[in-house]
Amino acid sequence: MTGYFIRRVLAIVPVMAIVVVCVFLLLRLTPGDPAAILAGDTATAEQLERIRQSLGLADSLPVQFARWLGLLAQGDFGTSLISGSPVTGMIAQRIWPTLNIAILTLILTIAIAVPLGVIAAWRHRTWADYAVMSFSVLGFSVPVFVIGYTFILVFSLELRWLPVQGYVAPTQDFGQFIVRAILPCLALATVFIALIARMTRTSMLEVLGEDFIRTARAKGIKESWVLFRHALRNAAVPILTIIGTGFALLIGGAVVTESVFNIPGIGRLTVDAILARDYPVIQAMTLLTSGIYVLINLLIDLSYAFIDPRIRY
Amino acid sequence: MTVQFKNRSFTDAEVVLDVRDLTVGFAGHPDAATVLGGVSLRIRAGETACVVGESGSGKSVTSLSIMGLLPKGSLEATGGGIGFEGRNLLDLGPSAIRALRAHKISMIFQEPMTALNPLMRVGEQIEEVLEAHTALPARDRRTRVLDMLAQVHLPDIERIYLSYPHQLSGGQRQRIMIAMALILEPRLLIADEPTTALDVTTQKQILGLIDELQQRHGTAVLFITHDMGVVADIADTVHVMKHGRIVENGAIETVLRQPRDAYTKQLLRAVPSLTPRTPRDTQEGEAILTVQGLQKVYGEAGIFSRSRPHVAAQEVDFTVHPGRTVGIVGESGSGKSTVARCIVRLIDPSSGKIRIAGTDIATLPPRALKPYRKHVQIVFQDPFRSLNPRWTIARSLIEGPVNLGIDRNTALARATELLAMVGMPEDTLERFPHQFSGGQRQRIAIARALAMEPSLLVADEAVSGLDVSVQAQVLALLSDLQAKLGIAILFITHDLRVAAQVCDEVMVMQKGRIVEHDTAANVLLRPQHDYTRALIGAAPGRGWDFANFRELAQASP
């Protein structure tokens, strides 16, 4: 177990190294000179050279890379070209809203999708199954921003149950956080609920046909034990995989929701940075998102070993 | 040889289960054919009633009906009754029937490999029965489980309690199932082919264990099997099923000595005898296959392997002559299939020589190997998986010859001949595998192997998945083909009865080595090695000559 744990953690190193190199090269290899973009159309050759010097773009690529790595190691992502403030600080400020929304979305998704999938499989080929499957198709097909605006229209503008937009940190006022976050989270969750409910159903159907389920029923235990103690855990590996990928996508997909619901998270930070060609911020965001993705995949791999005693790589 | 039947009388014992005229049909299709057409059987306390029949006869449906475990939405009881402790089980609601399961009526299943939850410790799986049916505190439950583990003679019970199913052997898992089934001392135990997936020596132990616990607790046992040998060893009464009906029942000795029903007689006649056949004439000529010092090691030391290497086969030497059948017998893990697969070069041997048609093919690279493939062809155990389900039979049959450069039409003409030779109708060519029964598919698989005109046919447990009557037909077919074509057969089997009927020579393998190699008569009648003796000793019903309804005549020395 410990050996497996250590090997999996060490496997992150080469992955992250490749990511770092790619992110570095991506920026240097994109057509166009960041200095020229920064300086604008009217800059003189002298001004351009000065900007290049100050950005460190005059040195050779390996030197630039080494310097950049050195800064990264200290957690320094550079300073924003637009605001002039350190990127690390900017992200630290904006990451929490995004993470909080993502986590709440995840909890909502699991709480709704897994029971739906289990019921659909348990009541296979009945109206309950068909209802879950229809919802699933619908959830796939409607884009997030449509769902978002529909929710705002119905729950905020018509019914006036919930505020339209905005964000309150959970540490500040948890109730207000939930009230304001519930709509964006539901909007984000819809597609994942559809996906995970479907995955849960498929996986459960397969497991419910296994011999040990018949054994469990032959023991005379309650149907809920059969479903949750015996079947769900055996069906968990594919479900977890989707949940993990979903969570990583949530972080990446925060861009749309945060724009629709006006939440000050990294999604909006990224949009702003891209529009303004704020390279250090874009670089940092790319690295951060990759890092989160790799980390979540690691957590999922490790959780397999907890669920299934046969997994010992 | 004497046969000890259980000649116990149960007329005074209390009736535990009384199934009367039970009918089962397809749910929602009241007009469709019935699956069970009026089954009646009665079991008394302490009695072992065997239900025998071939696949599709309805024996498993009968047992699942009693447990209330018929697949929901597809099968349902439509009439008759299942009397148990004064109640008709068919009238009980879901929670009432649940309360009976494992408490009053228990069941054990065929596949110990898949019948246990792979993610739960086996101790906890047994404990769950107590949790569901008793109010015992956790501490007492554990004690009780450990006590039960000791009763099924598992070693090191504290460790076993904490083990997961994959850490245990097949026999140990079946002991766990038995412990789970009997921990609440039910009145009735239903055992559905509980030893079919086990090796004979393990089977003997498990049957002994069920018998021991039955005697101790006075349990009534409903034992479902297709194996007449097992029936002869354990049954008090036997019920023969065919097409959803019981065609004959009675005390074991009566049914085996004086079967009345034609189907019972047919079933008994199909049981292969343990008395070896007269060997075929040795033919002159060079050996078709010579194997020398064959060895196969899995997981040989390498940079990436941390596990210890496993020697699957070693020091294997033998030759096969034209027109002869050489058998390899042994239990699971003995290396018999490894040897077969090396000879066909489906796996690469680690060392040794395999000489076919004058060439050592043991180390030939794939390209050089190709022309030799036609000399050796293989027929696998499971005809349901060895034919491509999306290909017509014609396409499967001509693929090999066409690959070797034979003209398509010639190959098709040959395929038609071959199908006639294996006794399949003409329209077989354009049909798909799922349209055939297991026996028919195995015939097709044999035709496919023969399409290559091999000089050696390797049959790897080729009849193990078939019902006895079908098995007898396929064995007869192989024998005919051999006489007609003069091919040699390497016959891999775990079943000594089958080996006795088809093999001229028998090799016994244990732990990757050949421990005994002689004529079939010598191996079966005058075994030299302890392991061979143990195998023969464990063969169920070995003292009885089923086909002739009497004790086995003493073999003439």
Image (tube, rainbow, N blue to C red):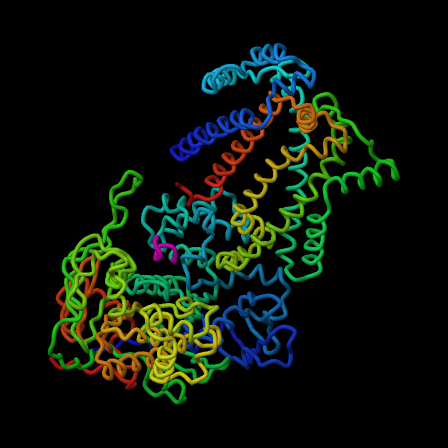
Which image quadrant for residue B241?
bottom left
> In x, y percent, where is residue B170?
35, 57
> In x, y percent, where is residue B369?
25, 61
- Does A190 sit above or below residue B213? above
The secondary structure that dominates the magenta segment is helix
Image quarter (top left, top right, bottom left or bottom right) of the C terminus of chain B: bottom left
Residue name at image x 66 percent, y 41 percent: A109
> In x, y percent, where is residue B467?
38, 76
Whether residue A170 is visible to the viewer of this picture, yes or no, is yes
Whether residue B253 is visible to the viewer of this picture, yes or no, is no
- Does A125 sit above or below residue B279? above
Residue name at image x 44 percent, y 76 percent: B437
Residue name at image x 48 percent, y 20 percent: A61
Q: Nearer the viewer, residue B425 or A117?
A: B425
- Does B530 sit above or below residue A107? below
- Judge whether residue B356 is colored magenta: no
Q: Nearer the viewer, residue A299 or B222?
A: A299
Image quarter (top left, top right, bottom left or bottom right) of the N terminus of chain B: bottom left
Q: Nearer the viewer, residue B249 or A266?
A: A266
Q: What is the residue that sits farthest to the front in this orientation?
A: A45
Relative horizontal placement of residue A253, taking residue B154 as reference (left or right): right
Magenta region: which residues?
B169-174
> In x, y percent, where is residue B207?
34, 65
Which image quadrant for residue A286?
top right
Relative horizontal placement of residue B426, taking residue B341 as reference (left or right): right
